[in-house]
C-alpha cells in the first residue's frame, strides 16, 4: 500500500463518492484570498514566476540536447505585455526520449494500482501548492485574467485531474486481484490459484491547448499514469510554461517515490518545427489525448487508426431563446457568457437562435430586433468599465483571433450588429484585447455560423419559429459539433422536446441558466464534458470509456497440488 495513498485517502474516497453521485464536489481552493493560503504564498508564487523569465527552464530531459541546432525552444509572448517571456525549454530528440521511457517503465507498470494512484494524488497536491505560480504562468501565456487563471486553470483543472484519476481508480478496482478456481473434470477436483494484473497499453501523448492548458491536460496525464502508461506531454507552442511547471513537479514526485522520472516528460516544439506527428508515429505510442482545433483533431482521428485517440476539439455551441419569465436576467447571462475570457472557452455560446416573431415573456412578446438591440446594450454596459472588462474578458491568446475577427466583419458586412473593438486594459497598455463581435443572420443563410469561431465572435440567427430554431441548432450540433448547448423556455412540455432533440444530436444542453455561476461553467465530478457523439470530440470527461481501454488484464494461474482428501476412492 502506498504511503501517499494513505495520506490522501480521505480526498480519494470523497472523490469516488462524488464520481458516483455527481453531486457538488470541489476539493481544491478556488479563491486566491490570503485567508485560504499560507502567509506570503501569493507573493512567493509571483516571484517564482518572475524569476523564470528570461532564462532557461530547469528541466533535465532525456534525449537533450537535440542533435539539430542548439536543442532548445521557446517563443512565448505575453498577451498582456506584448513582450517575449524569454524562457527556453529543452527539446529532446525523439528516439532517445522513448528509449529512456522504455528503460524505466517496467517497475511502474508492475507496481500495484494503489501505489501508482498514491503517486498521482501526491502530484495533484503539489500542483495545488504551486497554484499562484501557475496562475501567473497561465495569465501570461494563455491570456486568462488572474482570477480565471487561478480558479479555472488552477482549482478547477485540479478538480478535473482528480476526476480523471478517480475514474481510473474506479475502473481498476472493479477488477479482482486474485481468485481460487475449483472444478471437477471427471475425477478429482482441480484447483487453480489465479492472479490478475492490470497492464498498460503503451506511451501516451498528451497535447494541451493554448488557451486553457491544464483543464484537459491533467485528467489525461493522471488517467494515463494511474493505469501504468508513461506520458509525453506536448504543450501548445505559445503556452509551454504552465505545462513545464507541472511536468517538473510530477517528475520530482516520481523520483521521490523511487520510480524513473522519465515516466513523465515534456516535448515542446515550435510552429515551424512541429513534433506531434513524429510522436504519433513512434512504435511505442499507443494513446493520444488531444485538445485543440477541429482541423488537426480530425486529422488525428482519421490518420492514427492503430492508436487510442481521445479528442476535444470544437463546436458551434447554440442557444435557443424561445420564452422567458423575464428577459433581462437571460440577456445578462448571455452577455457574460459571450464576454467571459473573450469566448476562448469551449463552452462559450456562439449561435443564438431566436424565433422571427420574437421572445415570449411574462410581459408580452419582445420583437426579434428589440431582443438583439437589448443584448447589444447589455454587452456594452457590462464592459463599459475597463477594469471590469479586464476581469471578465482577459486578453486574446493569439493575434490570429484579431485577424479572424477582421475577416468575419468583412464577410458579414451590414449584418454586423456589434463591432468587436478592443477595450483599454487598465494595467497593461499593450494587452491584446477585444469585445464581442455580433452578427445577425437568417436561418437559411447561416453558413458563417456553421463552424467554430474561436474568440469573441457570435451570431444571432432568426428562425421561422421555435421549432425551426431548435431543428437548426440541433442539426448544426450533429453535423458540425457542439460541446455545450443552451435553451431558454417557460414551456415545460417543450423543454422535454428540447432535451430530446439535443440528445439525438449527441449534444449536452443547459436549460434556463441564469444563476450566479456563468452559463458556460462546467463542474468537475458533476458535468460530463463532451459526449463523443458529435464532431466536437471523441472523449468524455469523465466517463468509464475515458479510462477503461488504457489498461488490459493479464492473468497467471497455478495449479495447486492435489490433496489426499480429493483422491478418488
Image (cartoon, grey):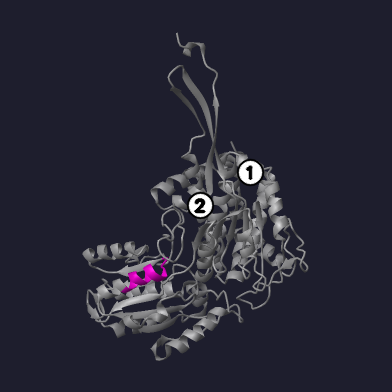
- Residue most toward the top? 569
- Residue most toward the front? 186
- Please check the rendered image and state whether residue 474 is part of the magenta-colored stretch, yes or no: yes
- Left or right, 466 with reference to 176: left
Q: Is residue 501 visible?
A: yes
Read off the magenta span.
Answer: 472-483
On the image, the x and y values in percent for residue 447 come to 39, 80
Say which element carries label 2. Answer: helix
Front of the two marks 1 and 2:
1
On the image, the x and y values in percent for residue 471 come to 29, 72
Residue picked out by circle 2: 164
- Left or right, 250 with reference to 20: right
Q: Is residue 32 visible?
A: no
On the image, the x and y values in percent for residue 390 come to 52, 76
Residue picked out by circle 1: 108
Distance of mark 1 from mark 2, alpha carbons?
A: 19 Å
- Left or right, 393 with reference to 84: left
Q: Which mark is residue 98?
A: none
10 Å crowding of disc 1: few (<14), some (14-19), many (20+):
many
10 Å crowding of disc 2: few (<14), some (14-19), many (20+):
many
Rendered-image quadrant of the C terminus: top left
Say which element carries label 1. Answer: helix
* Secondary structure predominantly adopted by residues drawn in magenta: helix
Amino acid at each position: 500500500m502506498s504511503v501517499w495513498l494513505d495520506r490522501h485517502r480521505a480526498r480519494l474516497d470523497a472523490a469516488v463518492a462524488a464520481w458516483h453521485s455527481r453531486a457538488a464536489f470541489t476539493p481544491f481552493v478556488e479563491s486566491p484570498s490570503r485567508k485560504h493560503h499560507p502567509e506570503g504564498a501569493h507573493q512567493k508564487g509571483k516571484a517564482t514566476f518572475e524569476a523564470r523569465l528570461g532564462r532557461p527552464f530547469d528541466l533535465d530531459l532525456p534525449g537533450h540536447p537535440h542533435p539539430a541546432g542548439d536543442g532548445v525552444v521557446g517563443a512565448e509572448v505575453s498577451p498582456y505585455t506584448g513582450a517575449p517571456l524569454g524562457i527556453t525549454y529543452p527539446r529532446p530528440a525523439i528516439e532517445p526520449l522513448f528509449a529512456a521511457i522504455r528503460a524505466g517503465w517496467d517497475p511502474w507498470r508492475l507496481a500495484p494500482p494503489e501505489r501508482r494512484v498514491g503517486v498521482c494524488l501526491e502530484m495533484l497536491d503539489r500542483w495545488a501548492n504551486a497554484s499562484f505560480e501557475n496562475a501567473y504562468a497561465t495569465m501570461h501565456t494563455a491570456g486568462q485574467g488572474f482570477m480565471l487563471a487561478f480558479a479555472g486553470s488552477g482549482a478547477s483543472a485540479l478538480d478535473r485531474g482528480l476526476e480523471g484519476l478517480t475514474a481510473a481508480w474506479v475502473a481498476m478496482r472493479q477488477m479482482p486481484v486474485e481468485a481460487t478456481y475449483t472444478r471437477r473434470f471427471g475425477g478429482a477436483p482441480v484447483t487453480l490459484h489465479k492472479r490478475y494484473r492490470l497492464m498498460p497499453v503503451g506511451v501516451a501523448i498528451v497535447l494541451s491547448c493554448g488557451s486553457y492548458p491544464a483543464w484537459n491536460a491533467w485528467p489525461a496525464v493522471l488517467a494515463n499514469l494511474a493505469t501504468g502508461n508513461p506520458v509525453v506531454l506536448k504543450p501548445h507552442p505559445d503556452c509551454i510554461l504552465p505545462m513545464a511547471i507541472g511536468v517538473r513537479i510530477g517528475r520530482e514526485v516520481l523520483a521521490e517515490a523511487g520510480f524513473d522520472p522519465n515516466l513523465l516528460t515534456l516535448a515542446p516544439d515550435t510552429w515551424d518545427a512541429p513534433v506531434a506527428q513524429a510522436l504519433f508515429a513512434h512504435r511505442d505510442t499507443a494513446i493520444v489525448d488531444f485538445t485543440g482545433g477541429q482541423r488537426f483533431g480530425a486529422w488525428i482521428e482519421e490518420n492514427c487508426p492503430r492508436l487510442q485517440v481521445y479528442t476535444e476539439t470544437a463546436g458551434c455551441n447554440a442557444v435557443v431563446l424561445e420564452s422567458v419569465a423575464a428577459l433581462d436576467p437571460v440577456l445578462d447571462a448571455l452577455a457574460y457568457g459571450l464576454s467571459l475570457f473573450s469566448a476562448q472557452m469551449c463552452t462559450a455560446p456562439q449561435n443564438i437562435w431566436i424565433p422571427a416573431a420574437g421572445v415570449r415573456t411574462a410581459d408580452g412578446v419582445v420583437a426579434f430586433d428589440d431582443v438583439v438591440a437589448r443584448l447589444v446594450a447589455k454587452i456594452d454596459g457590462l464592459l463599459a468599465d475597463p477594469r471590469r472588462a479586464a476581469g471578465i474578458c482577459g486578453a486574446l491568446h493569439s493575434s490570429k483571433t484579431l485577424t479572424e475577427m477582421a475577416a468575419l466583419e468583412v464577410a458579414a458586412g451590414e449584418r454586423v450588429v456589434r463591432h468587436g473593438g478592443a477595450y483599454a486594459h487598465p494595467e497593461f497598455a499593450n494587452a491584446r484585447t477585444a469585445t464581442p463581435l455580433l452578427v445577425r443572420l437568417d436561418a437559411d443563410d447561416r453558413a458563417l455560423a456553421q463552424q467554430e469561431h474561436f474568440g469573441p465572435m457570435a451570431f444571432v440567427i432568426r428562425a421561422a419559429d421555435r421549432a425551426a430554431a431548435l431543428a437548426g441548432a440541433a442539426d448544426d450540433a450533429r453535423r458540425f459539433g457542439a460541446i455545450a448547448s443552451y435553451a431558454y423556455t417557460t414551456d415545460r412540455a417543450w423543454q422535454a422536446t428540447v432535451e430530446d432533440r439535443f440528445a439525438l444530436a449527441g449534444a449536452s444542453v443547459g436549460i434556463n441558466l441564469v444563476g450566479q455561476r456563468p452559463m458556460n461553467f462546467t463542474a468537475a465530478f458533476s458535468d460530463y464534458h463532451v459526449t463523443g457523439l458529435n464532431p466536437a470530440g471523441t472523449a468524455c470527461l469523465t466517463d468509464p470509456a475515458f479510462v477503461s481501454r488504457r489498461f488490459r488484464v493479464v492473468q497467471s494461474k497455478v495449479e495447486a497440488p492435489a490433496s489426499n482428501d480429493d483422491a478418488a476412492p
